[in-house]
Amino acid sequence: MAKFVVALSDEAATDAERFGPKASNQAALGHAGLPTPGGFVLGADAYFYQLESLGLVEAAEQAVTLPFKESRGPIADVRIGLFSEPIASEIKTELLDAYRALTSEPGMRLAVRSSSLMEDTEGSSFAGQFQTFLGIEGERDFLTAVRACWGALWSPQAMRYMEDKEISAVDTAMSVLVQPLIEAEASGGGLSQTADGGMSVSATWGLGEALAQGEVVPDRYDLTPGGKLVEAVAGQEFEHSAYCQTHQGVPKPSGHTHDNSHNHGDLDDGRKQCLSAEQVEQLAGYMKVAEEMMGLPVEVEWAMDAAGLKMLQARPLRVEEPVVLDEVWRGRPGLRGHPGGMGWGSGRACVINCECEISRLNHGDVLVTNVAGPALVGILPRVAAIVAELGGSTSHLASLGRERGIPMVLGVAGATRQIPDGSMVGVDGVAGIVRWLKPELNEKPPMPLMHPGELRSLG
């Protein structure tokens, strides 16, 4: 009987304390009757066993207790050891047995994903902070991916995130989720609740990494609370978004459809969208099941291959009330994008076109940038809001912003060109609209700058 590896079809795989919420939620989705890729999970007990077998327990304790400069050596010892040293034979034997059984079908490729014990918990999603490996083939690469997932717990990026959340790396552990790779025709995410009471699905062609990393503008599908499609907006159509004049009268990007009685397979400009109305509403039904299973609103990830839709992940979702717009912002020029789903923020626009300019960003600024990737997590404590030309409501950065209550509008084409650097900007992260004041009005901010967590309904 396996000691460290459990099939997701086994009821034991729903134990979040052993396998982490990401893996346990994936197992629970399957047990609830939803389509998933299946696979197996390597427990956190294997991670602890590996630390002990490599003699790294003391180094791990030193890494989180010594002063910063003195801790760098032990951190490197732990991370390099987990990544480069052979896997203990007891663990390796089970892993390879499970790998061979899962890949018995010719041409099978795998997804190897982190599942930390703290990951996908309420308030700590760790979105984009660990490792996911797609398209793994061969036993050597498979074992390397497992070791890399273990070592990712000690990466500088993850440790900064944990420090901010007051989580110690020595108090958590890394489980590893292994599944057949969905050869996706389309993939994306979804929100079981939005601030206006509806639901939302985002989608892009192919694998979902580009969407998660904030490197594309996805299609967006808005639904009623009951899961009926009411609007579909093509991602690239945000290139043509017109300026907004009022909150109620913001022009929609071209290429959207409203009438649910029509076939949503093709947008007005002739571009074929990723999902049909039937598929979007099917996803909405899956989200409702996940929401009932977890007992709270959820954010999900999904993929679709030739066989149909598969659910890949479900995590807790924080939902914010709609914002009451202050009168001073009405009638100001603005742009529409994908709402991050959280609050209202204002501040001086800091337009950044490359990472080399990040030093220009001051506390309380609104960051206006191109790619909205999870690497920006380090600057989140400094900003009042974020506006990005790429990304969508279910990208990793949007998830991280919701954790902190930071307003974001993503997928705003032309933002870095059209929003004046240094202008006073207001970001409605619920409606998905960013506005700015004319330069001559910037001397007196229309409202005081506050911590993002305090920026709620202002009116």
Image (tube, rainbow, N blue to C red):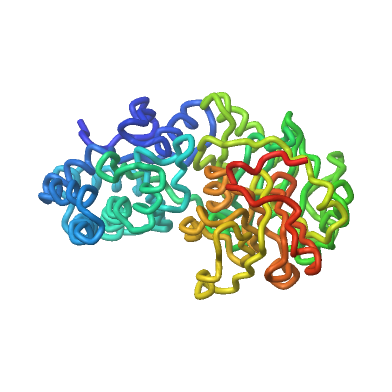
Which quarter shows the C terminus? Answer: top right
Tally of numbered tags:
0
Q: Does residue 373 sit above or below 189 in this rendering?
A: below
Q: Does residue 160 sit above or below 9 in this rendering?
A: below
Q: Is residue 116 visible?
A: yes
Question: With 145 as the anchor, is 458 left or right in this view?
Answer: right
Of residues 69 and 202, the one nearer the viewer is 69
Of residues 331 and 201, the one nearer the viewer is 331
Report x, y in % for residue 170: 25, 43
Of residues 232 and 297, the one nearer the viewer is 297
Question: With 66 as the anchor, is 452 left or right in this view?
Answer: right
Report x, y in % for residue 124: 45, 41
- Residue at 21% x, 52% y is 63
Of residues 374 and 131, the one nearer the viewer is 374
Question: With 306 as the anchor, is 9 left or right in this view?
Answer: left
| Residue 222 sits in quarter | top right
Report x, y in % for residue 160: 37, 53
Q: Is residue 210 visible?
A: no
- Residue at 23% x, 43% y is 47
- Residue at 31% x, 50% y is 153
Which quarter shows the N terminus? Answer: top left
- Residue at 28% x, 42% y is 173
